Amino acid sequence: MALSAVGAQGYSNSTASNAENFIEKSYVAAFREGFEQAFQQSESRLQPYFEQESQNEEYQYFDRIGTAADMTTDTSRFGTNPNSEIDHDRRRLGLVDYELGKYIDEKDLKRVITDPMNAYTQALLASGKRKIDDIIIDKFFGTAVTGKSGGTNVTFTSNAEDATTVKVGALSAGNIVTGGKYVKDTGNTEGFSVGANYTNGAAGASGLTVDKLLAARSTMLRLHAIDQDEVVNCFIGAKQFEDLLQEDKVINSDFAVRKSLAEGNITTFMGFRFIHTERLPLFDGTNDDERRVIVATSKALKMSVGTGLKGDMWRDPSKKNIPYIYFKLCADASRMWGEVAGEIRCSEA
């Protein structure tokens, strides 16, 4: 057929009535099989670094023992035997139930190429693992319950906004008293907090610095809570990674350390292991700009699990027998030792 005859055959694009004959009506829409997950944290970042216990009771108690008194000089013959009173206490852990679910209407399944149930399951599972981190963080800074039957509350020490000192809870302070860089808290408080403006003599607020890390580590050493070669876990956000990479002492450190930090890898520096998480809370102050970076060893917190994160699927007769995906978790946590439970306040203004 000659091109000049196209119009005579009814294919002219100037005739609206013949629009149904255009080649466009043969266009097709092709869809890739499968679903892509949204960007999200899909694994627990904190759980592997703290102690975990199984629990089958409403409450579980973990006994702790204190320190003995100093030895005294024996200057007598046939004297009475000395007897040292050693403090005992216990921490109580309960259990809290959490759940999450998703209905899947089979009418929807008939309208998609790929069954989305596996993708839904992965999304629900990721949510459950993030909840584990939230439980740990909440209980790390929350109230620990102690006493014979759990009648006494112990709170995490509260440093002031823009503080320039290291505040130590009264129950954790040991031989630390108020003076110099330290402030000893009062009452039933434990843990320690390095202030956002702690700069070891320099001026101005700051993010995560080498001076703050040194203050946290030296506090643990002073409390005899860690050995000098022990690695302490430090949970930081992306902003704190950025802060460290701008520190002269990090810039001038070993190339492997700088490379690992720049790539966001878990690495050790100055006796700290850095683990990335974006779930750390902000201090609820006036400016609301101080990130609460966690520094701790595994003994700082204990997580008790009644039922681990578990998924199931069934058909619900009350909803026309459509499939239902269900995840549950039964767990709780408690701060155990304030001497190895600390925070570094980091400005993000």
Image (cartoon, rainbow, N blue to C red):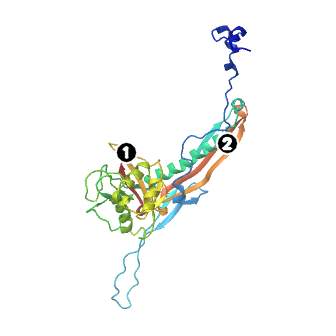
Tag nearer the camera, 1 or 2:
2
Q: Is residue 38 left or right of residue 286?
A: right
Given the image, on which type of amino acid does mark 1 rest? Asp
- Asked if 48 appears above or below 222 in the picture, the reply is above
Q: Is residue 99 left or right of residue 336?
A: right
Give the SS element for disc 2. helix
Task: In this rendered view, identify the residue nearer to me: 290 or 304.
Answer: 290
Which of the image's four quarters has the C terminus? top left
The structure residue drawn at horizontal position 66% and vertical position 11%, both measured from the top left corner, is 12
Given the image, on which type of amino acid does mark 2 rest? Asn
Cα–Cα gap, marks 1 and 2: 39 Å
Q: Position of residue 6 (x, y in %)?
A: 70, 12
Which residue carries the number 2 mark? 118
The structure residue drawn at horizontal position 62% and vertical position 40%, both measured from the top left corner, is 101
Asked if the residue at tag 2 contacts the one at tag 1, i.e. Cβ–Cβ closer than 8 Å, the answer is no
Which of the image's four quarters has the N terminus? top right
Q: Position of residue 25 (x, y in %)?
A: 69, 19
The structure residue drawn at horizontal position 67% and vertical position 20%, both measured from the top left corner, is 24
Q: In which quarter of the view is residue 202 placed?
A: bottom left
Task: In this rendered view, identify the residue nearer to me: 281 or 308.
Answer: 281
Give the SS element for disc 1. loop
Q: In which quarter of the view is residue 261 placed?
A: bottom left
Q: Residues within 10 Å of mark 1 (few under 14, many from 20)?
A: few
Q: Position of residue 278 (x, y in %)?
A: 47, 47
- Asked if 104 appears above or below 151 in the picture, the reply is above
